Amino acid sequence: MLRSPAHSLTGIHAATIVPMHADYSLDEAALAQHIAGVTAVKGIRGLLINGHAGENFTLTVAEKKRVVEIAREVAPPDCYLVSGVNQESSLAAAEEASILQQAGADALLVFPPNSWALGHADDVVLIHHRHVLEATDCPLMIYGAPVGAGQMSYPLSVLGELVREPRICAVKEGSWEVAAYEANRRHLKQIRPEFIVMGSGDEHLLTSYMIGNEGSQVSLAAVIPELLCDLWDASAGGDWTRARLVHEKIYPLSVAVYRDAPGGRATARLKACLKILGRLQSDALRPPQPLATVSEYHTLESALKHALG
C-alpha cells in the first residue's frame, strides 16, 4: 500500500551515512545500528537513504537495494523512507528506481546526473524524470541542487514543468542560498499550493523555517538528531527565541561540516563526527574521498562540544 507523503514528509528526516569496513565494503551491522539509533529519537519522522551523505554515487544498485532493505527492517513501521536515485543514464535510473521501490522505499528522490553540471537542455531534465515515473508508481521528489552546482540547479521554468506532474510531490530544496530558496518556494507553491518544500540547507535552516517550510531532509540530523528536532519544534510552534538559541548551538557544526574549505567533504566529516561521539568505529569512505584530517577532527570536536555541551 502506498503511503501518502502529504503528512509523512513533514518535520525532520535524517539523511543517513553508510558505514564501511576498511576494505570499503558495506558494514551492514553498523548500518543497522546507525539507522536504529537515529530513528529512535523522538521527532525523527523519516529517513533519506542513498543520498549524497550515503555515498550514493559510489554504491552499486545491489548495495543501494541492501541499504533500503536494512532500513526497512530496522526503522519503526511509521518511519517514512525516501531513497535517492542517482544514475547518469535515464534508463539506469529507471531500473534503479524500480528496484529500490520494490525493496521497500516509500518514495524516491531523483538526483540530477553529475554530467548536467556542465550544461544541458531543459528537456533533458523532463525526460530523465519521465523515465523514472514510468518505471515506478510511488511518490517522487525533486532534488533542488545548490546554486553553486552549475546546471544541476534547475531554473524556475523547469521546476514549474516538473511540479505539474501529480506524482512529483515534494522537493528537497538544497539551493543553499536564501534568495533562491524563497524564489523557488514561492514559484512552486503558486502552481501547487499543496506541494511540499523541504528546506534542506543545513546552514540556514532557521531562515528557511521563517520563510516557510514543510520539513527537512538533512544529514546533520544523522549526528545531532535531538537538536535538529528541537529546532523544528520551536520553529513550528512560532517560538523564535528558542529556535534562535538552538540555531546558535547548531551553527558552528554546520559550518565545520559543510562550509569550511575544501568543499565536498561533508560525508567524511559526518563520519568523523559519529566516530568522535562513539557511534561509529570506522570512518572509512570510498575513494577518491580521503578521510577527515587531524585538523578537521579538532574543528569538529570543538563544534560538537559547543552543540552538545
Image (cartoon, rainbow, N blue to C red):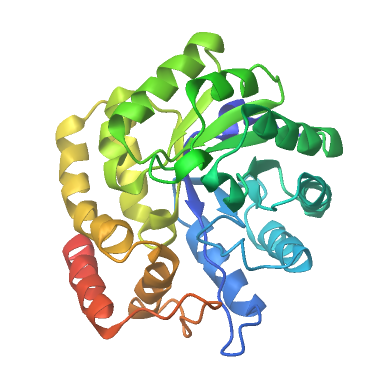
Q: Residue at x 82, y 38 (%)?
A: 136
Q: Give whichever of 9, 267 is nearer the camera.
A: 267
Q: How many marks?
A: 0
- Asked if residue 193 can be seen in this view, the reply is yes
Q: Residue at x 71, y 62 (%)?
A: 64
Q: Give whichever of 165, 274 is nearer the camera.
A: 165
Instruction: Using residue 240 as the reference point, say whether residue 283 is left or right of it.
Output: right
Q: Position of residue 287 (x, y in %)?
A: 54, 78
Quadrant location, the N terminus: top right
Within the image, what quadrant is residue 3 found in? top right
Q: Residue at x 43, y 24 (%)?
A: 184
Within the image, what quadrant is residue 163 found in? top right
Instruction: Using residue 64 as the reference point, say whether residue 41 is left or right of it.
Output: left
Q: In this rendering, is residue 170 above or below 307?
A: above
Quadrant location, the C terminus: bottom left
Q: Position of residue 10 (x, y in %)?
A: 50, 33
Q: Position of residue 193 (x, y in %)?
A: 52, 12
Outermost residue toward the bottom in this view:
22
Instruction: Using residue 10 as the reference point, say whether residue 299 is left or right of it.
Output: left
Q: Position of residue 251 (x, y in %)?
A: 21, 52
Q: In this rendering, is residue 127 above or below 289?
A: above
Q: Residue at x 16, y 64 (%)?
A: 306
Outermost residue toward the top in this view:
190
Within the image, what quadrant is residue 182 found in? top left
- Asked if residue 237 can be seen in this view, the reply is no
